[in-house]
Image (cartoon, rainbow, N blue to C red):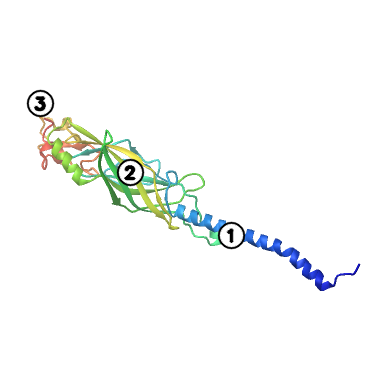
């Protein structure tokens, strides 16, 4: 049998290998295409996300008068519900504690900057009646910063949120004017939104907060304001040295009648 020349061997080997090389090249191109599509979908998904677990509202902080200083300590006292006395003010504003459970990304050893901290930009509020009827939906701007979580607990920060706007409060003041026994309960459904240092927009899940609206219900009449010669209150005459020390007068904290009787008739007497 006549032996095939070396050149013919090489040509035959190339012809045999060509389909395999083409198949492998095609597989690589297809794999790269699939990875590119997956990366694009992932980028779109995380570019603007509603994440009920990564960002959330822990609660509404209770006022701490007279200092009126608020801390992002999760052990701070919080309110179960709010109270707005429209005899004094028409707007309800709360300081909310916001938690961030995004894992830290920074690594100083590798010069990687931290991108999981969150800049708070505002809040979306849906205000309803106690039966679920929508009164108003609105957005409010807000500021604040929330650190990324640690190995054991979320990062926390604060944001101020308007929960009852002035127009709604004024309407309720007209409805309740002079009626101390009447109360209206509104429900504020709050969603905080912001942007991480890495440019990802995140919105929290809903946080529901009930607010009782009343007229004159936060005024208290201590025994010191009672006329010792009768059964009537003399809040104005006994008001020397008593000052308003509430963080927001007419919101959540009781008001001594002696501190407001010189300016508001609702403080003269409980009758």
Position of residue 164 in the picture relative to residue 23 (left or right): left
Q: Secondary structure at mark 1?
A: helix
Query: Which mark is in front, 3 or 2?
Result: 2
Image quadrant where one finds the C terminus? top left
The residue where tag 3 is placed is 231
- The image quarter containing residue 236 is top left
Mark closer to the chain start, 2 or 1: 1
Which residue: 50% across, 57% down? Answer: 40
Image quadrant where one finds the N terminus? bottom right
| Residue 97 at x, y percent in the picture | 37, 45
Position of residue 253 in the picture relative to residue 180 (left or right): right
In this view of the protein, which residue sits in the foreground, 112 or 123?
123
Which residue: 52% across, 60% down? Answer: 112
Which residue: 67% across, 60% down? Answer: 23
Regarding residue 33, the answer to whether it shows in the image is yes
Q: Secondary structure at mark 3?
A: loop
| Residue 115 at x, y percent in the picture | 47, 57
- The image quarter containing residue 179 is top left
The residue where tag 1 is placed is 32
Regarding residue 239, the answer to whether it shows in the image is no
The residue where tag 2 is placed is 190
The circle drawn on residue 208 is none
Mark closer to the chain start, 3 or 2: 2
Q: Secondary structure at mark 2?
A: strand
């Amino acid at each position: 049998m006549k032996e095939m020349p070396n050149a013919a061997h090489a040509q035959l080997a190339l012809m045999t290998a060509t389909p395999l090389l083409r198949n492998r090249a095609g597989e690589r191109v297809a794999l790269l295409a699939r990875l590119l599509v997956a990366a694009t979908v992932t980028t779109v998904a995380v570019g603007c996300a509603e994440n009920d677990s990564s960002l959330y509202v822990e609660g509404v902080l209770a006022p701490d008068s007279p200092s009126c200083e608020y801390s992002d300590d999760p052990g701070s006292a919080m309110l179960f519900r709010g109270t707005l006395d429209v005899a004094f003010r028409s707007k309800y504003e709360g300081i909310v504690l916001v938690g961030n459970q995004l894992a830290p990304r920074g690594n100083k050893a590798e010069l990687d900057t931290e991108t999981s901290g969150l800049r708070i930009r505002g809040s979306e509020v849906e205000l309803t009646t106690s039966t679920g009827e929508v009164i108003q939906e609105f957005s409010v701007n807000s500021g604040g910063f929330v650190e990324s979580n640690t190995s054991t607990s979320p990062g926390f920060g604060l944001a101020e949120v308007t929960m009852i706007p002035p127009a709604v409060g004024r309407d309720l003041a007209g409805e309740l004017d002079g009626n101390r026994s009447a109360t209206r309960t509104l429900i504020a459904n709050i969603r905080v939104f912001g942007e991480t240092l890495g440019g990802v927009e995140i919105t929290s899940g809903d946080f529901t907060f009930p607010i009782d609206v009343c007229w004159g219900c936060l005024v208290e009449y201590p025994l010191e304001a009672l006329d010792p010669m009768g059964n009537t209150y003399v809040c104005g005459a006994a008001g020397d040295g008593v000052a308003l020390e509430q963080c927001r007068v007419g919101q959540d904290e009781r008001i001594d009648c002696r501190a407001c009787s010189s300016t508001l008739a609702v403080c003269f007497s409980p009758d």
